């Protein structure tokens, strides 16, 4: 059976499963639509949270990113897991006890203010759309590489599937589909990782194989990788290149940002009891850790494999995967020294950030590129980091069904996260904007109708992002986490742990965090991207890590403004006392 | 156990667990990581292992310690939680 037919079968079966679950778990009330009737088992919720959390970026891009960053890649590993400790210890149980439907609900009630609720809704919508855009691009990449359909057709198929279970099922449909998607995703991630670990080190557990010796040799994999990297002019794989302060701030911004992301927080509103919210965060992190501890192993394996299978090989002898990815433009080769061999090393191969292909082919039959070569280094290879996980099974020559599985897993990761994000967008529109602010008279049935409408509209907008991807997707990821860390997280934390914090303090804090973080990122990422280097950064903190400083500013402003203005009303104090108890 | 004592016990527990959280990630994984790299754990340099593996295992363990400790505290306060309130 051809690998493409297998991919169609795997992807088709998984989609049929998701739609089947959606029909079985339709939502019939707003309680079911927003929080799945608060009846989700903590283990199932842990799986759903893991699927919700692990996006196309975690599944497709992260290991590739780490394999080029080496030790610095730890910012993503720690940053995207450590936030769950904060969630389980500081937020989830109390917000579950509060017992409403959305994150702005808590902020609006705790700070007795419609303005605070609106600020929270704005941050939430911005954060969530930023994120959705990336998911739809992930869907497009998988479809175009493995199913050879147009990216646009792929995005539309993805939209239809999400439409089915998000609009019909609401949180209930999404939760149970995410459980299925988690299983597909983790299986698809672990199977190739285990295979490759056995091939390279003989150890079937990737987490251990990664620290083991190579097959038929007494050299440790990581020592070999350090050696290879240094030989090719890169930094040693197991050493940092970023400064400690920058690594510290990026990790912190990602951790606190995770704990402030609305689509993650609402998952803990769906369990039956407060103690289940804690337990559920624990299970979620186990399920996430399974992938996140495998990712750095995959990163190291694929780096070794990649270098060894292309370095100083003749273009004519290269394996098919090189040419397949070259065909869709994510790999390119320019024979700078005309020796017909691939020379891979540190340095930029040519001017410009992406290859510009002409229609012709070069002397060895490679796709000709029009970019001017950079002559001061010998590197001839352009590679898009996003392809490492997808190409890994092919590079390691694994059977075709493994590749089909990886395609289905990548789609599961992208679709599950997209659905979770679309749900928080639609519930903040129908619940926070309409029911609680502008149209308080609507009844439950009308609210449910509006919730479904806003989910449908949000899917359309997300689909447009996928078809016409905005060029800034990569830059705005820093934005989503920075804003979540500097606006939503402090407002929630202070709302629970301080009774003195009043609405003036909370609003001033959120606005200060928002303006500081947003202007720093806009300055370096959009206005003056040529200045985006270490020497120009404030205290040596990159835009990716600035959310941490924004968070500290939020805390300082919120607490000082509160201490100079009136105390919050007595009912608020009583409410805080109540959510603190189990 | 009174609600005040319950809350104080909870805050104490949080302080201990969050300190460990900080030490294993920002400490061992980042600030002290280069220093720890002189020791090794199998084929891993120790600092590298904390940064890419160890801290994550630590996070999981911390959450479950909190789950069990809070279960004991909740029993002490002996207050039956109302479901779906």
Image (cartoon, coloured by chain):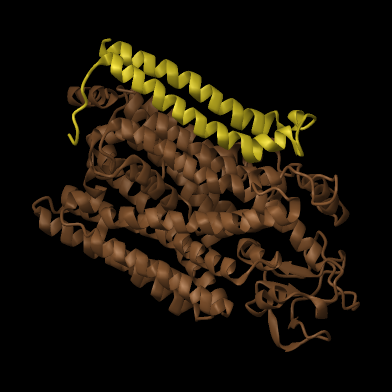
Chain colours: A brown, B yellow
Q: Quadrant of residue B53?
A: top right
Residue A376 appears left or right of A101: right
Dividing the image into 4 quarters, which one contains the N terminus of chain A? bottom right
Q: How many marks?
A: 0
Q: Nearer the viewer, residue A57 or A111?
A: A57
Q: Nearer the viewer, residue A314 or A457?
A: A314
Dividing the image into 4 quarters, which one contains the C terminus of chain A? top left
**Residue A494 image offset from top left, x and y in percent:** 36, 29
Residue A29 appears left or right of B15: left
Q: Nearer the viewer, residue A420 or A131?
A: A420
Residue B11 appears left or right of A539: left
Q: Residue at x 46, y 30 (%)?
A: B63
Q: Quadrant of residue A20?
A: bottom left
**Residue A316 image offset from top left, x and y in percent:** 82, 81
Query: Is there any visible trace of residue A129 in the rendered image?
Result: no
Q: Quadrant of residue A231?
A: bottom right
**Residue A144 image offset from top left, x and y in percent:** 54, 76
Q: Residue at x 48, y 40 (%)?
A: A286
Reply above or below: B67 against B72: below
Q: Residue at x 50, y 81 (%)?
A: A149
Q: Residue at x 64, y 28 (%)?
A: B27
**Residue A396 image offset from top left, x and y in percent:** 70, 64
Query: Is there any visible trace of residue A175 in the rendered image?
Result: yes
Reply above or below: A499 against A516: above
């Amino acid at each position: 059976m051809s690998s493409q037919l297998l991919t169609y079968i795997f992807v088709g079966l998984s989609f049929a499963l998701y739609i089947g679950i959606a029909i079985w778990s339709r939502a019939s009330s707003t309680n079911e639509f927003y929080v799945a009737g608060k009846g989700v088992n903590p283990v199932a919720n842990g799986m759903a949270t893991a699927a919700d959390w692990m996006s196309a970026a975690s599944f497709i891009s992260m290991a590739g990113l780490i394999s080029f960053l080496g030790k610095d890649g730890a910012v993503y590993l720690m940053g995207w897991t450590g936030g769950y400790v904060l969630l389980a210890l500081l937020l989830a149980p109390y917000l579950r006890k509060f017992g409403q439907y959305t994150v702005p609900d808590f902020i609006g009630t705790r700070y007795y203010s419609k303005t605070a609720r609106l600020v929270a809704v704005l941050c939430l919508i911005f954060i969530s759309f930023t994120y959705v855009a990336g998911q739809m691009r992930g869907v497009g990449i998988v479809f175009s590489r493995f199913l050879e359909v147009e990216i646009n057709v792929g995005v539309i198929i993805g939209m239809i599937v999400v439409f089915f279970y998000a609009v019909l099922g609401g949180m209930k449909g999404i939760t149970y589909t995410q459980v299925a998607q988690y299983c597909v995703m983790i299986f698809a991630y672990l199977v190739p990782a285990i295979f490759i670990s056995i091939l390279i080190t003989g150890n079937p557990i990737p987490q251990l194989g990664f620290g083991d010796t190579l097959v038929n040799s007494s050299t440790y994999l990581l020592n070999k990788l350090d050696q290879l990297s240094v030989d090719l002019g890169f930094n040693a794989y197991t050493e940092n290149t970023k400064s400690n302060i920058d690594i510290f701030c990026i990790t912190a911004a990602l951790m606190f940002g995770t704990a402030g992301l609305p689509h993650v927080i609402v998952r803990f509103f769906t369990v039956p009891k407060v103690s289940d919210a804690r337990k559920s965060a624990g299970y979620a992190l186990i399920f996430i850790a399974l992938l996140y501890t495998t990712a750095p192993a995959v990163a190291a394996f694929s780096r070794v494999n990649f270098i060894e299978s292309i370095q100083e090989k003749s273009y004519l002898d290269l394996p098919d995967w090189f040419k397949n990815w070259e065909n869709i433009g994510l790999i390119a080769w320019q024979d700078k020294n005309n020796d017909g061999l691939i020379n891979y090393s540190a340095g930029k191969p040519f001017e410009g950030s992406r290859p510009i292909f002409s229609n012709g082919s070069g002397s060895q039959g490679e796709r000709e590129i029009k970019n001017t070569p950079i002559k001061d280094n010998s590197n001839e290879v352009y590679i898009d980091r996003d392809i490492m996980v997808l190409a890994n099974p092919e590079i390691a020559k694994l059977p075709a069904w493994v590749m089909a599985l990886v395609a289905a897993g990548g789609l599961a990761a992208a679709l599950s996260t997209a659905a979770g994000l679309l749900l928080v967008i639609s519930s903040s529109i129908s619940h926070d904007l309409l029911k609680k602010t502008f149209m308080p008279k609507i009844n439950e049935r009308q609210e449910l109708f509006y919730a479904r409408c806003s989910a449908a509209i949000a899917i359309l907008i997300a689909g447009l992002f996928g078809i016409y991807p905005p060029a800034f997707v990569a830059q705005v990821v820093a934005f989503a986490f920075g804003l979540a860390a500097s606006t939503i997280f402090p407002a929630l934390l202070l709302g629970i742990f301080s009774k003195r914090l009043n609405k003036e303090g909370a609003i001033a804090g959120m606005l200060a965090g928002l303006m500081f973080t947003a202007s720093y990122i806009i300055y370096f990422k959009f206005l003056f991207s040529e200045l985006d280097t270490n020497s120009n950064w404030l205290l040596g903190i990159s835009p990716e890590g600035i959310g941490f400083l924004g968070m500290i500013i939020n805390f300082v402003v919120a607490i000082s403004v509160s201490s100079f203005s009136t105390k919050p009303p007595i009912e608020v104090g009583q409410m805080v006392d109540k959510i603190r108890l189990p | 156990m009174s609600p005040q004592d319950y809350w104080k016990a909870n805050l104490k527990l949080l302080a201990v667990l969050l300190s460990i959280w900080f030490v294993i990630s920002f400490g061992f994984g980042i600030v002290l990581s280069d220093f720890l790299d002189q020791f090794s754990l199998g084929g891993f340099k120790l600092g590298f292992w904390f940064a890419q593996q160890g801290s994550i295992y630590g996070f999981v363990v911390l959450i479950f310690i909190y789950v069990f400790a809070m279960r004991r505290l909740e029993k002490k306060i002996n207050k039956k939680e109302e479901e779906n309130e």
